[in-house]
Amino acid sequence: QSALTQPPSASGSPGQSVTISCTGTSSDVGGYNYVSWYQQHPGKAPKLMIYAVSKRPSGVPDRFSGSKSGNTASLTVSGLQADDEADYYCSSYAGSNLAVFGGGTKLTVL
Amino acid sequence: QVQLVESGGGVVQPGGSLRLSCAASGFTLSGYAMHWVRQAPGKGLEWVAVIWYDGTEKYYADSVKGRFTISRDISKNTLFLQMNRLRAEDTAVYYCSRDRDWGFDAFDIWGQGTTVTVSS
């Protein structure tokens, strides 16, 4: 159950787009379309932003989008806003009735 | 509205036990798989355990297998995590979370978390 690999940090100016990667293996990210993304503000609980690789729950702005290629999933935040500054975590089903998270990426809005 | 509220956290000595509770409202546990996810201080999220919507299946992360037990009381619409033989590395905020669909789809509802500190 190794954690998925995310860059520790990412940044962008207001209005710009930023993409966060999440790299796993063929046993997790590459093997299933059960990749999800979570936003976590300091001291708060995580919030589901993307599920099933690219689907948005009701209420999540369409500025947030997800994709996957091979063993790497990506979250793109377009039209960056100040409130997007937060930690972002990816997660994937890892087979054998286990789930795994990424180490998290701190997104800074410059 | 749909809500999860955890309780039961606290300070416990290494080797001790603690039981966490997660009260659900706005939906019934019998319709959803439920998870526990934890976050050590300053660290990332770690999946801990899941119980199937019908309670028939339970699965655990290797780090807690044999020490932690997930369960639920449908009559009280409450999820539990019994934690035994606690270690310093179990220190974390523990979140309960609802699965969006079949069991390992996505974590769509989260509680506010309860803090567990294992220290002598």
Image: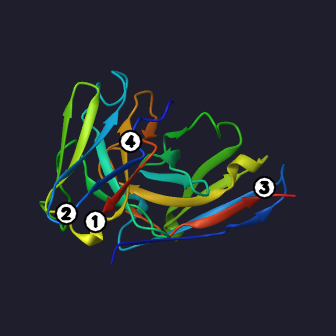
Residue B48, image x, y percentages: 55, 45
Q: Provide the residue designation for mark 4.
A: A7
Residue A98, image x, y percentages: 46, 35
Q: Quadrant of residue B120?
A: bottom right
Earlier along the polypeptide chain: callout 4 or callout 1?
4
Amino acid on which disc 4 is placed:
Pro
Distance from disc 3 to disc 1, alpha carbons, whole Å, reads: 38 Å
Q: Chain of mark 4?
A: A
Question: Contact, CB < 8 Å: mark 4 with mark 1?
Answer: no
Dot in front, 3 or 4: 4
Q: Residue at x 22, y 41 (%)?
A: A53
Q: Are marks 3 and 4 on the same chain?
A: no
Q: Are marks 2 and 3 on the same chain?
A: no
Say few, some or many: other residues with alpha carbon within 10 Å of mark 2 (under 14 / 14 to 19 / 20 or more): many
Amino acid on which disc 1 is placed:
Asp
Earlier along the polypeptide chain: callout 2 or callout 4?
4
Label number found at residue B64 = none
Q: Chain of mark 1?
A: A
Q: Are marks 2 and 4 on the same chain?
A: yes
Question: Contact, CB < 8 Å: mark 2 with mark 4?
Answer: no
Q: Nearer the viewer, residue B14 or A20?
A: A20
Q: Provide the residue designation for mark 1.
A: A84
The reply to whether residue A93 is visible in this rendering is: yes
For this orientation, the residue located farthest to the top is: A26
Q: Provide the residue designation for mark 2.
A: A80
Amino acid on which disc 2 is placed:
Leu
Distance from disc 2 to disc 4, alpha carbons, whole Å, reads: 18 Å
Dot in front, 2 or 3: 2
Q: Chain of mark 2?
A: A
Say few, some or many: other residues with alpha carbon within 10 Å of mark 4 (under 14 / 14 to 19 / 20 or more): some
